[in-house]
Image (spheres, helix red, strand yellow):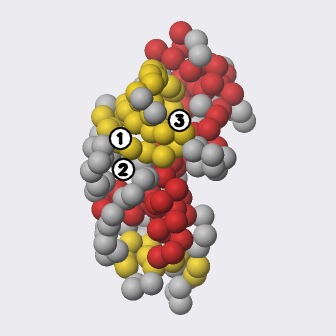
Amino acid sequence: FNYYSEHRLELRLLPSMTEGGSPDWDELTHFGFSLAGEYERGPEQELIVSEEVFDRTVGRYFKDLKYTPKDSSFVIYTGSGYRATGWDDHGGVYYRLISIKKDNNAYIATFEGVELYETDYWDDYDSAGPVMKTIMDKAQTKTAPDDVEKYLLEMFTSEDYAKLVKRERVTVKFELTDDPEALFTYLAADREYFIK
């Protein structure tokens, strides 16, 4: 819970892929651009990630991944980097570990994700999404409590978990790294959506 709460986009945007395969280019550019962390501004103040930073970011999370730089639905390849096409990732998905097992030098873990909408934090009870309504019920309030993550963690570790509407289930195969900012090298990922 804590790692993926601090690295909010990592599991949320992790592209689906088979072991030894290549992820969808759109999904990979969304992931790589969003997790790059080093941005430049273009002439119209648009965000740009250099090709070097993008490659380094992708290399932190995937082993020996081969790809050819090009446009995607999330970025335009400039010849030296990637320029965002215009999108955002507001709101959040929080993940609960459902199972984990060792597989030779790797691990296979399954997570379930619950989604909070961007507007949940300021909407009243009647306008809030289903997960925030459940949190509000637990907190006995009609607005989002200040400590949403505290309530989520309590619910993730109790029978209250059954009350939360699940957005997706993600199964990942990964190896551990020595990098405290990117603990996992992903070998495979599969995502099943419950809510479209």
Q: Is residue 119 visible in this depiction of the protein? A: no
Q: Circle 1 sits on which residue?
A: 189
| Residue depth check, mark 3 versus mark 1: number of the one nearer the observer | 1
In the rendered image, the quadrant that contains the C terminus is top left
Report the residue that reaches farthest toward the bottom: 43
Give the CA distance from mark 3 to mark 1: 17 Å
Q: Residue at x 35, y 41 (%)?
A: 189
Instruction: Give the percent coordinates (x, y) of residue 127.
Output: 49, 38
Q: Which amino acid does label 3 sit on?
A: Tyr
Q: Of helix, strand and loop, which one carries label 3?
A: strand
Q: Circle 3 sits on which residue?
A: 94
Q: Which of 136 and 161 is in front in this view?
A: 161
Quarter of the image for residue 45 reads: bottom right
Instruction: Give the percent coordinates (x, y) of residue 47.
Output: 53, 75
- Contact (CB < 8 A) between labels 1 and 2? yes
Q: Of helix, strand and loop, which one carries label 1?
A: strand
Q: How many marks?
A: 3
Instruction: Give the percent coordinates (x, y) of residue 75.
Output: 38, 72
| Residue depth check, mark 2 versus mark 3: number of the one nearer the observer | 2
**Along the horizontal axis of the image, is 175 left or right of 155?**
left
Q: Residue at x 53, y 90 (%)?
A: 43
User: Is 80 rendered above or below residue 164?
Assistant: below
- Residue 59: mark: none
In the rendered image, the quadrant that contains the N terminus is top right
Quarter of the image for residue 80 reads: bottom left
Give the CA distance from mark 2 to mark 3: 17 Å
